[in-house]
Amino acid sequence: MIVHQILVGGMQNFTYVIADEKTRKGIVLDPSWDLDRVTDAIRKDNIEIELIVNTHHHYDHTIGNEEMAKTLGVPIAQHVDSELEHDRELRDGDTVEFGESSLKVLHTPGHSVDGISLLGDSKVFTGDTLFIRSCGRVDFPGGSASVLYRSLKEVFGKLDDNVVVYPGHDYASDPTTTLGQERKTNPYLMAGSLEEFTALIGG
Ligand SMILES: [Zn+2]
């Protein structure tokens, strides 16, 4: 799987171009700012984008949707609980396919009700659910510490140590990490109880 991790805008957001190596079909994940750099990456690898996917509805992950959809002529897919307009609804367990590659949709609410992560090829794209040595805020509308705790424990808890984490923001010294590394260093993943987690996250 080809992954372009593109740092965009003034809030350290990552937009991803993810494509099937053989067929060059792919998706754009979370287009927001600096769309010319995203289209440069698409062109450079001769990728045919088939779909825009958003990890959640927050504007810093979606503000480029309309322009990108128009430029590329592709539909937009979001979790069924997203309050924004979208063409395709995604639910937990669904598969996003492009060429001979696919990513599984994992519903990971807590930062927002419509938060999803995408898993495939030993990679997980976590949006604002899990960051390197950190996790998403829960003080926006729809945020919930207990729901986020459950997503981190029950969804990411089941994934292998070698799965590479691609977060929605560049908030750490490294742009990616592994779940095994996070289990040893991320205090939010290491929290042993909801009480401990809530004390850490403050909400
Ligand atoms: Zn967000």
Image (cartoon, rainbow, N blue to C red):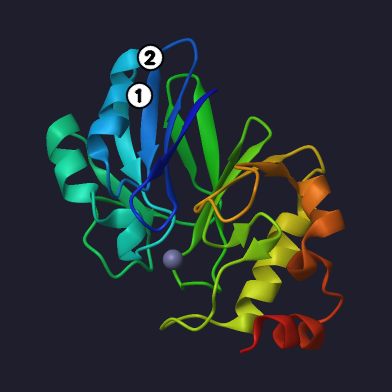
| Residue farthest left in this picture | 70
Q: Position of residue 82 (x, y in %)?
A: 34, 66
Which quarter of the image is occupied by the N terminus? Answer: top right
Q: Are marks 1 and 2 in contact (CB under 8 Å)?
A: yes
Q: Is residue 75 left or right of residue 123?
A: left
Q: Element at badge 2?
A: loop
Q: Which class describes the residues within 10 Å of circle 1: few (<14), some (14-19), or many (20+)?
A: some
Q: Amino acid at mark 1?
A: Ala
Residue at horizontal 60 percent and vertical 42 percent from the top: 175
Quadrant of ligand 1 in image: bottom left
Q: Is residue 94 left or right of residue 46?
A: right
Question: Residue 198 or 53: which is nearer the viewer?
Answer: 198
Label 1 belongs to which residue?
A: 41
Q: Position of residue 53 (x, y in %)?
A: 37, 46
119 vs 85: above or below: above
Residue at horizontal 50 percent and vertical 57 percent from the top: 116
Residue at horizontal 30 percent and vertical 27 percent from the top: 49
Q: Amino acid at mark 2?
A: Asp
Label 2 belongs to which residue?
A: 45
Q: Position of residue 64 (x, y in %)?
A: 23, 49
Q: Quadrant of residue 11?
A: bottom left
113 vs 17: above or below: below
Q: Quadrant of residue 47?
A: top left
Q: Is residue 69 left or right of residue 143?
A: left
Q: Is residue 152 left or right of residue 11?
A: right
Count of numbered tags: 2
Q: Which class describes the residues within 10 Å of circle 2: few (<14), some (14-19), or many (20+)?
A: few
Cα gap from disc 1 to disc 2, whole angstroms: 6 Å
Q: Element at badge 1?
A: helix
Residue at horizontal 36 percent and vertical 37 percent from the top: 28
Q: Position of residue 15 (x, y in %)?
A: 40, 43
